[in-house]
Amino acid sequence: MQKYIVFIIIFLFVFPFELKASSKIKKDKKEKHKVELPRASEPDPYVEIKKDVLLSQAVVAHCGSRRLIENMTEGIDVSHYQGSIDWSSVAKGGKISYAFVKASESNYFIDDYYDYNISEGRKHGITMGSYHFFRANVNMTEQFHHMISVIDPKKQDIVPMIDVEAANGVSSDRFAKRLKEFLDMVENYYGRPPILYTYVNFYNKYMAYRGFDRYPLMIAFYNELVPSVDDGNQFIMWQYSCRGRIDGIRGDVDRSKIMSGFSIYDILMYQ
């Protein structure tokens, strides 16, 4: 009888550990085959803002809102995530005057819908621009040549925009140096300083006080209050929502507006 009791005690204490160990081994094997794709950080709505600067139109403009800002020059930015866009309906809706479409990323990626979006948008009278997603850990020259192979200056209404929201493990000093190198090449090729797109926290960490205030800036900030950046740089455009709804586009779309004191003419490709 005592033998059976000892056996039961051993079974109760040892067997659970074996189950846990077996489960861990299976999980480890599964993790080895799991591929993590690179992800860019999302704009942070909870950063330092100017409390005394309120949006005069009294609109809640965070990511969860779908209300519209009235009587302002409005724009969108789109990519393959929006699928096939009915640009005729976008234009007829009368809410959008400009649009940025994703063209390229890194030194190899081309957006599947780029050619369609840029040509159809212009065809229906929307002021169109293109953007390149910048990768700081990729060779700058290779990245630049890839970008200009996709974004034809003759097919742009607006100066090209550089989407800057991923450091890719590069230190802040090295990041700033590489970005400036890239921007110099872009400016020399297109004849105008490119527009920079980023969000508040990223700008403050990697770009503030580093000489990037000479470039037109679009800031992403999903909040009802107008944002600000540490070095006081005056941004031309504010991307105020990632949940906009527009006729002709299925699902959510990023929406932006041109700030008071600026106009679309400040960022046109040819003036």
Image (tube, helix red, strand yellow):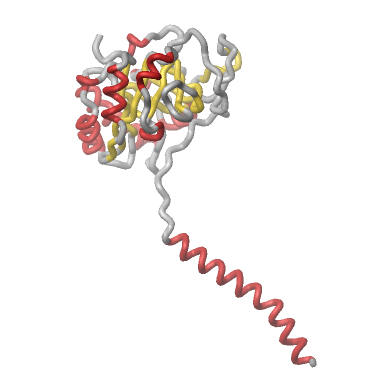
Give the answer, above or below, for where 143 lies relative to 233.
below
Occupied quadrant, residue 270: top left
Give the answer, above or below, for where 201 lies relative to 260.
below
Measured as percent of width and height from the top left, residue 96 is found at 41, 15
Occupied quadrant, residue 47: top right
The residue that appears at 27% across and 31% down in the rendered structure is 182
* Image quadrant containing the C terminus: top left
Measured as percent of width and height from the top left, residue 199 is found at 46, 28
Residue 211 visible in the snapshot: no
| In the displayed structure image, the side of residue 153 where residue 262 appears, left or right | right
Residue 242 or residue 24, whichever sits in front: 242
| In the displayed structure image, the side of residue 175 where residue 11 appears, left or right | right
Residue 189 visible in the snapshot: yes
Measured as percent of width and height from the top left, residue 90 is found at 40, 19
Measured as percent of width and height from the top left, residue 224 is found at 57, 19
The residue that appears at 59% across and 12% down in the rendered structure is 58
* Image quadrant containing the N terminus: bottom right
The residue that appears at 56% across and 71% down in the rendered structure is 22
The residue that appears at 65% across and 77% down in the rendered structure is 15
Looking at this view, name the residue that lies furthest to the right. 1
> How many numbered marks have been drawn onto this rendered protein structure?
0
Occupied quadrant, residue 67: top right
Residue 63 or residue 237, whichever sits in front: 63
